[in-house]
């Protein structure tokens, strides 16, 4: 159906554009201010003079952060967590979503299995029982305590199984007629045509692992094994001065607390800001198709 470009509709479209631009600016301005503060002098940042442009431009905050072995170590731990955690999430999600995407005639009690997993989204054992399980499995203070408890992201499973259900059945039946097994069909047919959904849940898993901080504080007994967000929470938010050495205190003369916070916050968010544009073209397609039940 062809819609007429009446004056009212034109005004409506431009009003939508203006609203979206305004919302976009509101979202990006805080990050711009954080970046400006990180490049400003300690006196300007401490006195609140910095708005959206650096005042007395300097790299002192980044030089201080770059010489912090704790920051570099926690950054490496987070990278290890993201690589290992996302790989486990993706493999488990695909292997779980594929059979659950089948009809009840192909998988008995399929609906019951789906509701069993949905139940875990609504209810869990709680913090203390989970900690006891992690402790009894001897995973405290190890990378496995950060990746295995969230190995099965149920929301991602539901998103992916709905996407799998939208794949034309004729395509799958043709592979079965050609003699392909379920494994061959999954890895050679289903996975290649599901790249938008896979890119979407990969982004979800990456952001989830990168931003997680609470489990690092709970399951890591030694601060030197904290992932990046846990380290930033203790140093930036809680401001635990006991972790600072005499050399750190000397360097703090050139930077203020706001400089350091801004620099570490920006560096902590930079990897996600770089990854998102690479997956953005898949994101909307995957989230829309995967959220629609056939």
Image (spheres, rainbow, N blue to C red):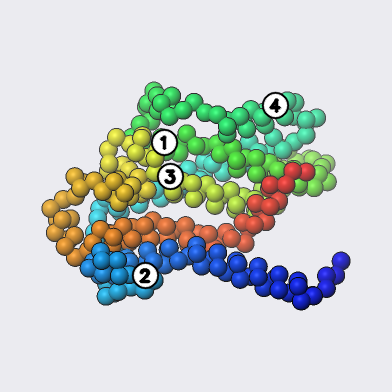
Look at the image and tell me in which quarter the N terminus lies. bottom right
Q: Which residue is mark 4?
A: 112
Sequence order check, earlier mark of 2 and 1: 2
Q: Secondary structure at mark 1?
A: helix
As displayed, is residue 238 above or below residue 43?
above
Mark 1 or 4 closer to N-term? 4
**What x and y, as percent, mark residue 120?**
57, 30
Please name which of the two marks, 2 or 4, marks the residue nearer to the observer. Answer: 2
**C-alpha distance separating marks 2 and 1:** 42 Å
Q: Residue 36 versus residue 230: which sits nearer the camera?
A: 36
Judging by the rendered image, the residue that carries numbered circle 2 is 51
**Label 3 neighbourhood size at 10 Å, few (<14), some (14-19), many (20+)?**
some
**Tag 1 residue:** 144
Q: How many angstroms separate mark 3 from mark 2 (CA)? A: 29 Å
Q: Nearer the viewer, mark 1 or mark 4?
A: 4
Q: Report the residue at 37% width, 48% height from top.
A: 229
Q: Which residue is mark 3?
A: 212
Residue 178 visible from this viewpoint: no
Q: Is residue 272 visible?
A: yes
Which circle marks residue 90 in the picture?
Answer: none
Residue 68 lies, in percent from the top left, at: 24, 55
Structural crowding at the residue carrying mark 1, measured as other residues with C-alpha within 10 Å and reported as few (<14), some (14–19) or many (≥20): some
Q: Are marks 1 and 4 in contact (CB under 8 Å)?
A: no
Q: Which quarter shows the C terminus?
A: top right
The picture quadrant where one finds residue 223 is top left
Residue shown at 19%/50% (left/top)? 244
Question: x, y (%) of residue 114?
Answer: 67, 31
């Amino acid at each position: 159906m062809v819609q007429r470009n009446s004056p009212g509709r034109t005004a409506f479209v431009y009003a939508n554009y203006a609203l979206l631009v305004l919302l976009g600016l509101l979202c990006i301005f805080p990050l711009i201010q954080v970046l400006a503060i990180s490049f400003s002098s300690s006196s300007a940042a401490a006195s609140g003079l910095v708005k959206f442009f650096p005042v007395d431009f300097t790299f002192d905050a980044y030089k201080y952060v770059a010489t912090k072995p704790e920051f570099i170590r926690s950054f490496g731990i987070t990278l290890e967590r993201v690589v290992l955690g996302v790989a486990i999430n993706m493999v488990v999600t695909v292997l779980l979503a594929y059979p659950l995407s089948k009809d009840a005639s192909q998988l008995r009690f399929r609906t019951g299995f789906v509701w069993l997993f949905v139940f875990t989204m609504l209810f869990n054992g709680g913090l203390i029982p989970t900690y006891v399980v992690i402790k009894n499995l001897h995973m405290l203070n190890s990378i496995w305590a950060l990746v295995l408890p969230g190995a099965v992201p149920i929301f991602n499973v539901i998103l992916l199984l709905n996407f799998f259900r939208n794949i034309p059945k004729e395509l799958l039946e043709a592979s079965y007629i050609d003699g392909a097994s379920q494994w061959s069909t999954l890895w050679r047919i289903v996975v290649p045509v599901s790249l938008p959904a896979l890119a979407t849940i990969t982004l979800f898993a990456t952001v989830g692992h990168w931003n997680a901080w609470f489990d690092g504080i709970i399951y890591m007994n030694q601060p030197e094994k904290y992932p990046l967000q846990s380290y930033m929470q203790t140093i930036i938010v809680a401001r635990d001065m006991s972790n600072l050495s005499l050399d750190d205190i000397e360097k703090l003369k050139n930077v203020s607390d706001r400089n350091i916070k801004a620099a570490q916050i920006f560096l902590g968010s930079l990897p996600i800001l770089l990854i998102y544009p690479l997956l953005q073209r898949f994101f909307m397609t995957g989230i829309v198709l995967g959220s629609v039940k056939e």
